[in-house]
Amino acid sequence: MGSIIKKVYKKRNLLRATGYFLPAVMTIVSSCTRNLDLPKVQAEKKIVLIGELTGGGPALLRAGQSLPLAEGNELKFSIIEGLEVKLEDENGIVQQLSGSADEMTPVLYTVPFKSTVVLSPGGRYKLTATHSNLGIAIAEFTIPSAFTSSIIDTTSTSYAGVSAFELGIQIDDLPGESNYYVIEAIKQYIDVTGFFSFGGQWYDLNGNKRLYDSLNKANLSFIKNFDTTFSSNYFRQPVYTTDPYTDNLTYGNSLNPSKRILLRDVNFNGTSYITHISVDKSQFLATGYIDRGQIMITVKSVSEDYYNYLVAYEQTEPGLDPNQPVRIKGNVNNGLGMIGAVYTRRFTYFFDSWGY
Amino acid sequence: MSILLANRNALLSLLLTLCCSVKSTAQQKALLNRVFRASFTKGTILSYIENIQEKTGVTISYSTATIDPNKKVKLKGNEETIEDVLIAILASENADILEREGKILIIPAVKEKKPVHRTYTISGFVRDKHSKEVLIGAVVYVPSINVGAVTNNYGYYSLTLPAGYNKAIYRYIEYKADTVDIEGESDRRIDILLEFKENNLDEVVIYREEKSGIAADHLHLTGEDIYKRQALFGENDIMRRLQNTSGVQTASDGFSTIVVRGGDPGQNLNLLDGVPLYYVDHFDGLTSVYNTESVKSVDFYKGNFPARYGGRLSSIIDVNTKDGDMDRIGGQFTMGLLKASLNLEGPIVKERSSLMLAARRTWIDGLFAPFAKGSAVNFYDVNLKFNYIINKNNRIYASFYNGRDRLNVNISNTQNRTSWQNNISAVKWTSIINPKAFFNITLTYSAFNFEMKDNRQTLDDVDIKTGDSYTGASSVKDLALRLQLRWTPNTKHNVDAGLSYSYAFFVPVEVKSKYASGQTQNISTAFRSNEVTLYVEDDIKLGPKWTIRPGLHWANWFSSKFTYSSLQPRLFTSFKASASSMFYLSFSQMAQFLHLINSNTYGLPQGFWIPSTAQIEPEESLMGALGYSLNTSGNLHFNMELYYKDIYGVTAYSQGKDIFDNTDSWQNKLTQGKGWSYGIETNIDKKIGAFVASAAYTLSWNWRKFDLLNDGKKFPYRYDRRHNLKLSLIYTPGKNTELTANWTYMTGEAITLPDQVYPDLDRNLMIQTTNSSTPSSNYTYYYTQWNNYRLPAIHRLDVGINFHKKKKKHMERTWSIGVFNAYGRRNVMSVDLVSDATPGEFQLKGISLFNFVPYLSYRLKF
């Protein structure tokens, strides 16, 4: 030991020569990742049902399977196969929902299921999903009663440092029951394809815009056809509120942007209530042809379990948070996910123009 | 005539009687009154008796049941007769002296001679011989009567002794012991200067019970102890040194933040010269705010709390800085990979006043400054202490601390400026009222400020906009006055009493935002509170084997809206089973009116303080401990302690992303519950030749339970590390070299992992977000249990070598080289569920830091 120390000691000059400022300093904070074992627990995949079932519309939901974080499981989503989904109403009438993969299935790992039956406001339903390996998952829900709502005023303003679209929304609350309201703003892309006929020939409008404009300018009569395609993809617009009755201000403040405004009727049961929201309109206007669309302001009455789900959902951040987990409880028994029952009022605004 | 004759006869009879009685008395003391001068002034009772017999031929009879012939006594030197000498040597014996039949008899006293219980008190300061620095925790012990005392935080001791001759031994860790012969009956002042032992490895680093009957209820460290064990980056840090003690673990491996016996970091009372610190970390724990170069001593309690401490539940870290060398100007310079440090101290007036200045700053950021203009990552701190001896009984001190961490980011036109700052000051006056009473009064001020500002964006908006700006702040300010008295009425009692008042002003979060549109937003929460405390305790020596220290600490926390009172009994008792072993038992009730809450997205430092309010109750703990300690003459120290602790009012988030998003309802986001921990701790230290080996092992369980969390079921606390083992070896082959090796093993911490992952709601409703202010994910994590997953165990080996060289009389330099985590174990600090490579495919990843980190440092003492 002593001789080793002497050798090391004699190298002190070498150490001094290399100095303190070696790139070795770069190894001071050397970090890395490693794969970890999954928890040694027993956990099985579960049927996942996700959807908003709207009164006055068909039952439309997506179904998949979960990924258990347990030893022995491959952490890879797979598309569920062989799932049967039935919808039963309060009269015992059962309908089998049809489901098949769509273009989003490889991305979302869920399969859409749809019924032809129109859901009735106030109606009670039971959704049963059966899978040979995953068992039976059941979600029971009641579609909220129809209600009325209206936009009483709008203005463009500035809020929280952003250009905002402010709306005054009146909700006519139903007496004698507890109601839970959700307000959102989303943009739906719309593709408007135009064709026109001139000189016996059909032209694509976009590719022959100059000709189209000149014909219009000359006030000539010619045939125009437009195909409007509404995209099935929506883009959420951040919303703000100063309403102290909202759950948003219970957990946050008026300058925190939210995905949804959440409001219970505890303070205005059975009366008409006016609330104001501000929508961040920085993305209202399209930057190109593709992202033109309409702004939809939806006011929804939702089931209580769906409302509680959304309150917890509003407080989550993307990614894992081992020290501040937010527990989100759904309503699918022996499964996961949320079948939200809603009744929707929708208001549409156009800020984009197609120039046709 | 007959009457006259009768009167004459009567008178003659009277005269004859008087003469006879005089003659008789004279004859009775004829031996005692013989002239005699002893041949020596110091000896045993027996030696003096023999000396008298030998020189005078007088026979002296006695019984050993009456006197202790081997008792050492001392003469003044002015004794003239045998009687004088016998009275002097038998002063403390319950005996009488008689002369009978030509002999001198020493017999039991007829009347209980209340041996004068004559006592006297010795008192004074114990100091370093060269620097005159007072030594805290030095021991003064009188083995013949098995009594002793320990110097207080100002180096002062007081010890009452029986009249007569006594030999007192003064000891302190790493100093040569000094012995003083004391004789007399009147109080006296004895100031001692102890000499430091160079290259000392005889003393094991842990403060242990000297054979004085004084119980070791805490860990006492000196600055030199801390230097013996390097840690990450070669940093000698107090908090890292404490992590080598059983019952203490690091919150995150490699960092200095500690948790003690199931508590959280906010339950440690960190004191700097008696002033409470609210934040003790630089850069989240790369090093603590304690500058080792300015430290004189550290007293650490993880239980057995004396009544003079209060305000926190889990531990006391009482750090005292150096006063400054009273004799010569000197100091120390240290340079490591992280920072450089300079300590200067010296007399202003020799033997009267001195100054100590210690400053340090990161230096490595300077290398990168030219390449990252406007950005900066650094910290500095400064300790300054002044002291002045007014007279031999009175002294004043003034100490100051200022430290700041800074993080400036100037990327993509952002101008983010973040800083954390501690400011502390204390003024103390100490006074010796009389040899048995020591008094001190302290005025302290402690302030912590955090500030984060940006001139180009607001807090929740990642876009850069001219005209947008915000300032976020968090602060605590505390002003306090403390009075303390130590009274030592006799050898059996040591009474401490004190009174304090403090005023605190908290601003947990304050955010001022300004938008280009002119809109502004202010979020601010502020609290004012007052605290009064009163304590008394008595260290009682019930007998040669048994001591007991009962105490009471009362605290009242109040504002205009609430008041909380807490009466906290404390008890510590020890029983010496043998000369080298001891059992001890303690009970402590503690209360804490402040809560340290970890913040989320505001980017605040690791946690911020909130006070108790009408809604948030104080935290309290009850702890019992049973221990056994063994110190053998073969340089073995063994200690084992069992403990159980209940904690009430533990505080945690129940919901919400940020606690102070809404200043009206922030209290609703917190929930209070219960915690409990129990375990067994073992420490062993052994010196074998040039080796000093230490082992500290803890087996413990730590639980939490909240009504609103985890469905009200108990769950393991985050820092529930079942096993915690520290092995240490110091090898000193010669006086100029020492090698250290430390091996650490800890069970992984408990974290919360989701049970299941399933597709996200919004994504399956076909709703995406392109706005960064409301981010979304493709997946939802489903949690059912808290802290249901254990990170892999942590273990690592740290090795280091110190090369010392004495250059001149007062100059010594040390090179230190070593490696933290020598075998590169990837100890996981956090986890993530990663889905990068293939969508829909995940991998649970552990993220680790500090894998094989070499260090090099240089230290020069002058």
Image (spheres, rainbow, N blue to C red):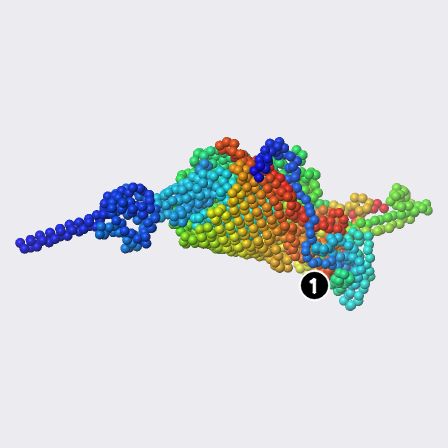
Taking the spot 82% from the left edge, 52% from the top edge, the residue there is A103
- Left-right relation of B716 to A157: left
Taking the spot 79% from the left edge, 44% from the top edge, the residue there is A287
Q: Amino acid at mark 1?
A: Glu
Outermost residue to the bottom: A91
Taking the spot 65% from the left edge, 50% from the top edge, the residue there is B792
- Whether residue A289 is visible here, answered yes or no, is yes
Q: Where is residue A167 drawn, in percent x and y? A: 72, 51
Foreground: A301 or A148? A301
> Considering only vertical position in the picture, is B366 above or below A184?
above
> Considering only vertical position in the picture, is A186 above or below B154?
below
The chain to which mark 1 is attached is: A
Foreground: B740 or B811? B740
Q: Where is residue B358 drawn, in percent x and y? A: 53, 37
Foreground: A159 or B497? B497
Q: Quadrant of the N terminus of chain B?
A: bottom left
Taking the spot 44% from the left edge, 40% from the top edge, the residue there is B194
- Whether residue B287 is visible here, answered yes or no, is no
Q: Where is residue A275 drawn, in percent x and y? A: 70, 54
Crowding at mark 1 (Cα within 10 Å: few <14, some 14-19, many 20+):
few
- Left-right relation of B360 to A29: left
The residue labelled by disc 1 is A177
Q: Where is residue B203 drawn, in percent x and y? A: 49, 43
- For label 1, the SS is loop
